[in-house]
Image (cartoon, rainbow, N blue to C red):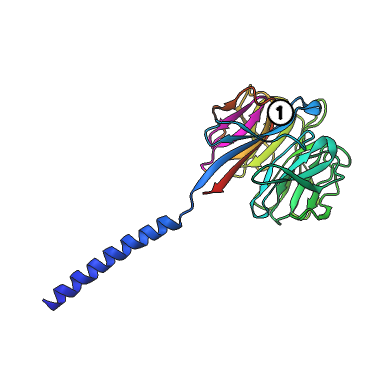
């Protein structure tokens, strides 16, 4: 009888522990609010410019910022710093903006020859591309301190960057007259030559990114086509065509992604197949950057 009582007590204790443990895990699990930010290039060098904010369904558009902008090219939230970085091509500076209000704070970095894309690299430094000038990739500390020119070979009209699993850096050049290309550098900035260049499958690339399989997805702006290349630079296939001017990439946690296209933002599945127009409207003229922000509730 005593043994039976001990067994029953142990069973009750285990059930209670598991139940309580499960509740504790649920309480510690983080929930997020999704916000989508879109950089609007307006009429390019003439404006008007703005950063548009959408909800997770691509609805309820509001202007996050529209003041201190000069042909904005990208959006990068630094949550731990409480700031948003926006490169302004026509004025040569990266602005620092308040993460909550969007209000301009100060210049994060200046004297850049047409800054376009910015991204935090594997070394936790900020990498900055240049549209004009020597076309070298610049690096900065997260506080805005200049580190160095990471590359020694310039990429003219550079407007897309990403890293492969080995830490090699890839930079795309929009080019002139259908002379687009993608150049490869090792983790020390040494030039490894062309990854892909002007051919029937690459006209004027903008943003690029590697998928989980190691293939490179390319926004071919000039062709209005989303393309896929293998890890050696060999063309695989077109994922989507007749898309308009594809520019900007915003990644979702489920593997789907968003791409700017003229006055719309398009949604693609994890394989690069077009799903639908995520947002389109009069509030947007030319989407050229998309940032997906996950805010802890």
Question: How far across and how far down the image is residue 218, in percent?
Answer: 67, 35
Q: Nearer the viewer, residue 216 or 39?
A: 39
Q: Residue at x 62, y 41 (%)?
A: 215
Left or right? Give the position of 89 relative to 58.
right
Q: Residue at x 19, y 75 (%)?
A: 6
Classify mark 1: helix, strand or loop: loop
Rendering quarter of residue 11: bottom left
Magenta part of the chain: 254-271
Question: How far across and how far down the image is residue 240, in percent?
Answer: 60, 27
Q: Can residue 278 be spotted in the picture?
A: yes
Rendering quarter of residue 279: top right
Q: Which residue is mark 1?
A: 221
Residue farthest to the left? 1
The image quadrant where one finds the N terminus is bottom left
Left or right? Give the position of 87 relative to 64.
right
Left or right? Give the position of 60 relative to 122.
left
Q: Can residue 252 be spotted in the picture?
A: no
């Amino acid at each position: 009888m005593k043994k039976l009582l001990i067994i029953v007590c142990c069973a009750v204790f285990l059930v209670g522990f598991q139940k309580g443990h499960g509740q504790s895990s649920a309480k510690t699990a983080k929930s997020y609010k999704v916000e989508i930010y879109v950089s609007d290039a307006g009429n390019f060098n003439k404006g008007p410019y703005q950063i548009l904010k959408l909800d997770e369904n691509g609805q309820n558009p509001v202007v996050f910022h529209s003041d201190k902008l000069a042909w904005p090219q990208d959006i990068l939230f630094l949550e731990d710093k409480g700031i948003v970085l926006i490169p302004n091509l026509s004025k040569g500076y990266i602005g620092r903006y308040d993460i909550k209000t969007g209000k301009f704070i100060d210049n994060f970095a200046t004297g850049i020859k047409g800054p376009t894309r910015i991204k935090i690299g594997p070394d936790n430094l900020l990498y900055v591309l240049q549209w004009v000038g020597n076309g070298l990739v610049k690096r900065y500390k997260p506080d805005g301190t200049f580190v160095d020119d990471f590359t020694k070979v310039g990429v003219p009209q550079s407007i897309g960057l990403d890293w492969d699993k080995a830490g090699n850096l890839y930079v795309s050049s929009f080019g002139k007259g259908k002379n687009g290309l993608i150049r490869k550098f090792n983790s020390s900035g040494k030039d490894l030559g062309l990854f892909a260049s002007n051919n029937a499958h690459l006209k004027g690339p903008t943003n690029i990114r590697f998928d989980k399989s190691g293939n490179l997805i390319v926004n071919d702006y000039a062709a209005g086509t989303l393309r896929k290349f293998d890890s050696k630079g060999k063309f695989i296939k077109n994922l989507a065509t007749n898309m308009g001017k594809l520019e900007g990439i915003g990644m979702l946690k489920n593997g789907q992604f968003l791409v700017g296209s003229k006055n719309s933002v398009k949604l693609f599945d994890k394989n690069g197949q077009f799903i639908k127009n995520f947002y389109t409207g009069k509030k947007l003229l030319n989407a050229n950057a998309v940032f997906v922000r996950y805010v802890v509730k």
